[in-house]
């Protein structure tokens, strides 16, 4: 439903939003109905990885719903996938979760960064630096990864 605003200014009626297609949208959302999203990765000035990477320096997980169990081998890990279950045995450098609904278990990490939604990262040992800019995201000690 589109609503046109009508305002009284000095006794004169001003009809707002006269241009076609403009107006105040009440009770409707652009895109998915009832969707509430924060700023996108691009809007936050970050670059979202577009492809999976698995090499000696980094591991990037992009496939939604994937289950991964690997040795971290001091790599940097970025999980952009949604609904993923990731277990990283051993020591990691950076672990970053930017997806939605993902669980990451890590043996240990130097730094854990959360910027996604509904994610949980658990670490088995150590005292990582934690930066949590996510929504409904948690970092806990424990988990199922081997230290």
Image (cartoon, grey):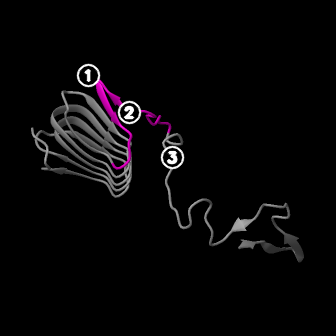
State the CA–CA distance, disc 2 to disc 3: 20 Å
Q: Residue at x 52, y 62 (%)?
A: 35
Q: Is residue 128 left or right of residue 115?
A: left
State the CA–CA distance, disc 1 to disc 2: 13 Å
- On the image, the x and y values in percent for residue 65 come to 34, 50
Residue 51 occupies which quadrant of the picture?
A: top left
Q: Residue at x 31, y 48 (%)?
A: 84
Nearest the eye: 90 or 133:
90
Q: Secondary structure at mark 3?
A: loop
Which mark sits nearer the N-terminus, 2 or 3? 3
Residue annotated with mark 2: 52
Image quarter (top left, top right, bottom left or bottom right) of the N terminus: bottom right
Boundaries of the magenta span: 45-65
State the CA–CA distance, disc 3 to disc 1: 29 Å
Q: Is residue 54 magenta?
A: yes
Residue annotated with mark 3: 40
Asked if 45 appears above or below 103 in the picture, the reply is above
Q: Residue at x 34, y 55 (%)?
A: 101
Q: Is residue 48 magenta?
A: yes
For marks 2 and 3, give the one nearer the viewer: 2
Predominant SS along the magenta part: loop
Label 1: how many residues lie within 10 Å, few (<14), some (14-19) or many (20+)?
few
- On the image, the x and y values in percent for residue 18 come to 85, 64
For marks 3 and 1, give the one nearer the viewer: 1
Residue 136 occupies which quadrant of the picture?
A: bottom left
- On the image, the x and y values in percent for residue 54 come to 31, 28
- On the image, the x and y values in percent for residue 140 come to 19, 51
Q: Secondary structure at mark 1?
A: loop
Nearest the eye: 76 or 44:
76
Residue annotated with mark 1: 56
């Amino acid at each position: 439903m589109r609503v046109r605003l009508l305002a009284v200014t000095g006794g004169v009626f001003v009809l707002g939003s006269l241009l076609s297609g403009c107006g105040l949208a009440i009770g409707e959302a652009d895109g998915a109905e009832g969707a509430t999203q924060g700023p996108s990765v691009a809007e936050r000035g970050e670059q979202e990885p577009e492809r999976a990477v698995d090499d000696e320096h980094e591991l990037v997980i992009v496939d939604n719903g994937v289950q991964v169990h690997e040795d971290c081998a001091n790599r940097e890990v970025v999980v952009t996938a949604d609904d993923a279950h990731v277990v990283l045995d051993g020591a990691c450098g950076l672990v970053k979760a930017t997806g939605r609904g993902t669980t990451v278990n890590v043996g240990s990490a130097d730094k854990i960064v959360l910027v996604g939604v509904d994610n949980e990262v658990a670490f088995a040992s150590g005292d990582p630096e934690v930066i949590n800019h996510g929504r409904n995201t948690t970092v806990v000690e424990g988990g199922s990864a081997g230290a």
